[in-house]
Image (tube, rainbow, N blue to C red):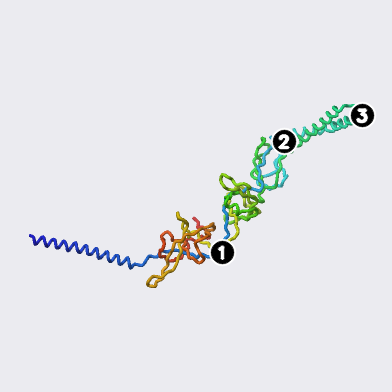
């Protein structure tokens, strides 16, 4: 019996020992495989940092407005007896828009003008008699007051008649007509919108920190959604003399020629104020920048050799200082030198010292045409 137990124990020791030995052998082989396995190379795309001229811009947003624009309204109440324009018509300053009924005012004017001759003769007669001592100075003064009062009435009637004849205050294009023949208009009724669209304006705000970068006459480009492929050129025409103390911004106005009349008031617009060109500056694609809590970084690619003399590519992370960005590129103020090779895509899997391989990819290229849905 004791012999059987000893044999069982021996067999158990052999079985468990073989399992443990196999696992130890397996762990050694796995360690050797991992040690001898080549370091993985992660695919990336790269570009070379080069010196080039850089023209920075100040970006702003605003709304287009006309050089002159007004909603023409009636100053007095009355019935429309004549309309002399249509919607969307080009007008010159002084062109008649419409006339209101002025028959009563015309009759009053004619009656007053009929009395003017007699009142003037009475005043002259009183003046002559005063020199002869036949009338008093008071009677002459009364005659003069009557003449001046009648002249004032005539001027008042003429002014009232003119207010019932509504004319274009400046050259421009009419909008949609809001009145009709025979309609009774109350004082203040809007008749039509009139705008001079030969030249437009844009108002926008600039931070007070950038105030020293702008000046009257400075060129700028304006972009609107209605004409995405067109850059409208303009110039700064006025700068507000005071900074808004609550927001720290200052209002700026620019004039924009509108020869083709593609700009309309009320359009949302993006403005790029052109700043002086900087020579020999380093720029790289925006996709190369890694934005982190401790700053902006890029991955630089270098070629190195291992102990066996094999060449491999490796990346090193570097902190950079950035300026303005535009058109997919960013101005690098410090941290890069001309000729540095920078990773432009594939950074998500990278870490400092990672091995990489350069591939060609057109995923970051902007297509000339957007595919149709």
Tag in front: 1 or 3: 1
- Asked which secondary structure carries label 3, the reply is helix
Identity of the residue furthest to the right in this view? 132
Residue 246 versus residue 93: which sits nearer the camera? 246
Residue located beneath label 3 in the image: 132
Tag in front: 2 or 1: 1
- Asked which secondary structure carries label 2, the reply is loop
Residue 308 position within the rendered picture, expressed as x and y whole percent measured from the top left: 37, 72
Res. 277 image quadrant: bottom right
Residue located beneath label 2 in the image: 101
Tag in front: 2 or 3: 3
Residue 109 versus residue 365: which sits nearer the camera? 365
Residue 115 versus residue 236: which sits nearer the camera? 236
Q: Are marks 1 and 3 in contact (CB under 8 Å)?
A: no
Residue drawn at x 58%, y 61% is: 278
Alpha carbons under labels 1 and 3: distance apart: 98 Å
- Neighbour tally class for label 1: few under 14, some 14-19, many 20 plus, Cα within 10 Å: few
Is residue 74 at least partly visible in the picture?
yes
């Amino acid at each position: 019996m004791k012999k059987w137990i000893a044999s069982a124990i021996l067999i158990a020791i052999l079985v468990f020992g073989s399992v443990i030995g196999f696992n130890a052998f397996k762990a050694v082989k796995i360690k050797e495989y991992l040690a001898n396995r080549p370091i993985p190379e992660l695919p990336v795309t790269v570009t070379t940092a080069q010196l080039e001229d850089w023209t920075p811009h100040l970006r702003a947003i605003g709304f287009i407005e006309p050089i002159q624009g007004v909603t023409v309204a009636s100053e007095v109440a009355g019935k429309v007896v004549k309309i002399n324009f249509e919607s969307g018509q080009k007008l010159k300053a002084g062109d008649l828009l419409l006339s209101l009924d002025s028959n009563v005012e015309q009759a009053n004017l004619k009656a007053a003008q009929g009395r003017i001759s007699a009142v003037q003769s009475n005043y002259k007669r009183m003046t002559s008699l005063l020199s002869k001592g036949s009338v008093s100075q008071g009677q002459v003064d009364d005659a003069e007051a009557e003449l001046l009062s009648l002249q004032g009435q005539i001027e008042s009637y003429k002014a009232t008649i003119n207010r019932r004849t509504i004319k274009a205050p400046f050259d421009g294009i009419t909008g949609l007509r809001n009145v009709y023949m025979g309609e009774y208009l109350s004082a203040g009724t809007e008749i039509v919108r009139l705008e001079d669209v030969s030249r437009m304006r844009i108002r926008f705000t600039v931070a007070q920190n950038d105030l020293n970068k702008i000046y009257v006459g400075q060129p700028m480009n304006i972009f609107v959604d209605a004409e995405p492929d067109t850059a409208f050129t303009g110039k700064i025409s006025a700068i507000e003399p005071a900074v808004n103390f609550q927001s720290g911004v200052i209002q700026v106005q620019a004039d924009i020629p509108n020869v083709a009349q593609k700009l309309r008031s009320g359009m949302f617009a993006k403005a790029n104020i052109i700043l002086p060109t900087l020579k020999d500056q380093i720029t790289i694609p925006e996709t190369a920048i890694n934005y982190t809590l401790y700053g902006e970084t890029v991955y630089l690619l270098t070629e190195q050799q291992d102990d066996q003399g094999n060449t491999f590519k490796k990346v090193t992370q570097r902190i950079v200082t950035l300026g303005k960005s535009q058109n997919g590129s960013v101005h690098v103020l410090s941290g890069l030198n001309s000729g540095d090779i920078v990773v432009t895509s594939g950074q998500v899997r990278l870490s400092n010292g990672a091995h990489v391989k350069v591939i060609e990819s057109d995923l970051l290229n902007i297509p000339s045409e957007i595919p149709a849905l």
